[in-house]
Image: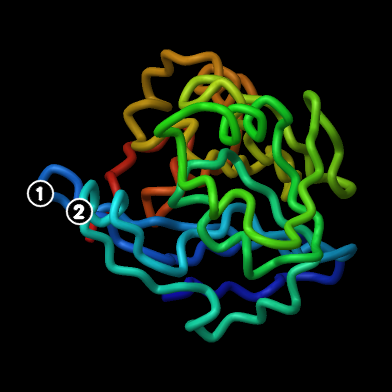
């Protein structure tokens, strides 16, 4: 299920999408993608998908899962995890990375632990998880920044990756489909457009959105 692309040059930063589930939404199949950043200083995983079914998720989405730990994927090779937000389809694999730092905005972590019907709380607080609660923008690694992007949830964040003259942005659900970046309405969507990305990677579309290009929605 992995779109594998080799590092093109020494010191390059690359982004690889991996499909970890398919959800059924209003008669359509919607993929769930996580993204791996290969960086000279470490390997970063953005969101973790799901590794097991839960009645609430089954009732809503009838998912088919392709967990990272059942793919040809080096779980032990991940140095840092980022959660764009803590909805179930983005944090259900966090338990695979117990003991490693998991970066999330503090507002998001607080809401996930406090709000009812927000997420699956036992997935958020699986044993031995080590959250790094972030307040605002930070540099994670040289050329990789976490930036708050409220909208889908108040505590959502995006990952800005300097891959060339213009950045790539890993959006999580800040935009769920391309039209939300073509005509941005939320603070987070406007932020992504203001960054003028070369590519914007969404969690539920296989291919990236590109500015100035007629974008076809990814579909199964």
Pick whichever, 165 or 180, lies toward us: 180
Judged left or right of residue 38, residue 58 is: left
Pointer 1 local density, CA inside 10 Å: few below 14, some 14–19, many at least 20: few
Q: Residue at x 73, y 40 (%)?
A: 165
Q: Image quadrant for the C terminus?
A: bottom left
Q: Does the residue at mark 2 contact the one at mark 1 (Cβ under 8 Å)?
A: yes
Q: Residue at x 36, y 35 (%)?
A: 178
Residues under labels 2 and 1: Cα distance?
6 Å
| SS at mark 2 in the image | strand
Total number of numbered discs in the rendering: 2
- Picture coordinates of residue 187, whole percent (x, y): 54, 14
Residue under the point 78% across and 59% down: 80
The residue furthest left is 27
Q: Secondary structure at mark 1?
A: loop
Q: Which residue is mark 2?
A: 24
Between 58 and 27, the one lying in front of the other is 58
Tell whether 151 sits left or right of 23. right
Which residue is pictured at 71% across the width and 32% down the height?
105
Colouring chosen for the image of the structure: rainbow
Q: Residue 163 got which mark? A: none
Is residue 218 visible in the rendered structure shown here? yes
Q: Quadrant of residue 111?
A: top right
Q: Which residue is mark 1?
A: 27
Can you give x and y, in whole percent of width and height, for residue 182 in the image? 38, 25
Position of 155 relative to 121 (above/below): above
64 lies above or below 206 = below
Query: Which quarter of the figure has residue 206?
Result: bottom left
Crowding at label 2, few (<14), some or many (≥20) Cα neighbours within 10 Å?
Answer: some
Give x and y (percent) for residue 19.
42, 65
Camera-side residue: 58 or 10? 58
């Amino acid at each position: 299920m992995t779109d594998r692309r080799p590092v093109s040059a020494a010191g390059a930063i690359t982004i690889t999408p991996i499909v970890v589930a398919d959800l059924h939404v209003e008669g359509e199949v919607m993929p769930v993608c996580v993204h791996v950043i290969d960086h000279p200083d470490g390997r970063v995983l953005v969101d973790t998908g799901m590794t097991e079914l839960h009645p609430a998720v089954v009732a809503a989405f009838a998912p088919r899962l392709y967990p990272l730990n059942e793919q040809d994927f080096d779980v032990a090779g991940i140095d840092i995890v980022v959660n764009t937000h803590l909805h179930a389809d983005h944090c259900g694999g966090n338990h695979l990375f117990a003991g490693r730092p998991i970066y999330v905005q503090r507002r998001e972590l607080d809401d996930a632990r406090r709000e009812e019907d927000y997420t699956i709380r036992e997935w958020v607080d699986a044993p031995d998880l080590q959250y790094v609660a972030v307040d605002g923008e930070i540099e994670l690694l040289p050329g990789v920044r976490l930036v708050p992007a409220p909208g889908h949830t108040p505590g959502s964040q995006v990952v800005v990756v300097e891959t060339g003259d213009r950045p790539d942005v890993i959006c999580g659900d800040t935009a769920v489909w391309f039209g939300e970046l073509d005509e941005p309405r939320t603070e987070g969507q406007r932020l992504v457009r203001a960054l003028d990305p070369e590519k914007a990677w969404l969690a539920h579309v296989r291919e990236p959105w590109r500015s100035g290009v007629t974008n076809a929605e990814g579909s199964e």
